[in-house]
Image (spheres, rainbow, N blue to C red):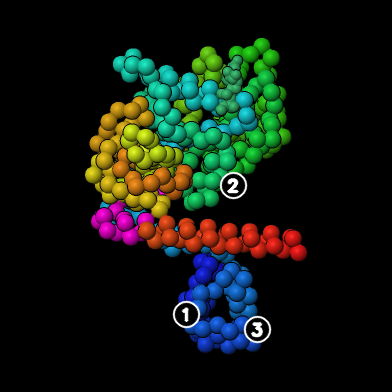
Amino acid sequence: TLRVTEFISANDLASLMDVSVNDVISTCLSLGMFVSINQRLDAEAITVITDEFGYAVQFTSAEEELEVEEEQGNDVNLQHRAPIVTIMGHVDHGKTSLLDYIRNTKVTASEAGGITQHIGAYDVTTKSGNKIAFLDTPGHEAFTAMRARGAKLTDIAIIVVAADDDVMPQTREAINHAQVAGVPIVIAINKIDKPSANPDKIREALSKNNILVEEWGGKYQSQEISAKTGKGIDDLLEKVLLEAEILNLKANPDKNASGSVIEASLDKGRGYVATIMVQTGTLKVGDIVLAGAHYGRVKAMFDDTGKKVNEAGPSTPVVLLGLDGAPQAGEKVTVMETDREARELAGKRSQLLREQSIRTKKHITLDEIGRRL
Ligand code: GDP
Ligand code: MG
């Protein structure tokens, strides 16, 4: 299988297949296609040509071409990093309540008023003194969207199932998404404070979906919890930490940061505001960052409680001011050496986005015409 970007030139396609460009051109001719060396080929042409040469083709996005290589360098200094956790599950099974409970218990009296702003990612310290970063995604759609953009952000998934309900379609979907992504699962059987709670029924339903919990001899950790009373939540977090220990998550804090966009928006007073999850390195105020098709110098950063910070290390969510636009969730964030470099790449990427949207529009128009005919 050949990994190819759409609109690759005939010449580049030839070298990818390790054949001479003349062979490609003459093969095209024999198929009735006139192709010149530097001609850019569309998906259809690429598929036909690669097929002629005995290759299956897998299209990679043109964005991948404009990717910045992560600074490798000094990876001798790998250090433990906190797990990044996503809570998933069926609607109304208690995802929001669970995250709220976890967050609220860490809001100290000194943080008057507690947390009000929604930033999409939170930094939690457990009773045992360990850190966990939580992604507050509106559900598995966001999880999938982020994965589609290549953001491998989630280390562990908590799947919430309400004990007074059942394993539901979105529970199964969440399990499936996590498994496809190769993300370990910890089951939270929620709402056990309810008189109608029947955790055994949930364990049984899970087992029918190939999720056999440890209590029943399986490999999946699970915990009965109540997001209302807080029962079992500390134990749940310890199980998440145990899973993290097995993963042996490491990152080098001593290099230029890279991470992913969690969410971004335009704030009237502050300009573009982006929540970033730092994944490796340390992000600092003053750094030049490239985020998708946008860039800028970090003017200020805030932690998840709104407190000003000067730097943020691996697995830390941070709110950043200074970008020249709002990048999309899941887009990669990279620290660049020079302003010029960042500006150029951001420019190329936004041009690419414009071209793509024009192409998509064209396709839609042709489709519509086709349907009308
Ligand atoms: P989400 O859709 O998964 O985010 O679910 P929510 O967190 O919004 O919860 C749905 C409903 O269940 C809300 O009315 C919550 O108050 C309630 N709920 C969530 N967790 C519990 C729990 O542990 N016990 C009880 N009794 N109710 C809960
Ligand atoms: Mg919710």
Q: In the visual, does 74 lie left or right of 17?
A: left
- Which quarter of the rendered image does ligand 2 occupy? top right
- Contact between marks 3 and 2 (CB within 8 A): the answer is no
Mark 1 or mark 3, earlier in chain? 3
Q: Which quadrant of the figure contains the C terminus?
A: bottom right
Q: Residue furthest right?
A: 373
Would you say residue 338 sits in the magenta stretch? Answer: yes
Residue to which mark 3 is pinned? 31
* Nearest to the observer: residue 348 or residue 283: 348
**Amino acid bearing label 1:** Asn
Left or right of 285: which side holds 42? Answer: right
Q: Residue at x 30, y 16 (%)?
A: 110
> In terms of depth relative to the viewer, which is nearer, 252 or 124?
124
Query: Could you tell me how far apart the alpha carbons at marks 1 and 3 are, in whole angstroms?
Result: 18 Å
| Residue 268 placement (x, y as % from top left) | 37, 35
Looking at the image, which residue is at 69% across and 35% down? 169
Instruction: For the residues labelled 1 and 3, say whether their Cβ atoms are less than 8 Å apart.
Output: no
Compare residues 231 and 28 and report the one nearer the observer: 28
Q: Position of residue 288 (x, y in %)?
A: 28, 49
Q: Residues within 10 Å of mark 1 (few under 14, many from 20)?
A: few
Q: Which residues are magenta?
A: 332-346
Residue 117 in view here:
yes
Mark 3 vs mark 2: which is more N-terminal?
3
Rounded to the nearest angstrom, the CA distance separating label 3 from label 2 is: 40 Å
Which quadrant of the view contains residue 112? Answer: top left
120 versus 349 height, above or below: above
Residue 38 tag number = 1
Q: Is residue 68 magenta?
A: no
What's the CA distance linking mark 1 and mark 2?
A: 39 Å
Residue at 39 percent across and 22 percent down: it is 115
Q: Which residue is mark 2?
A: 180
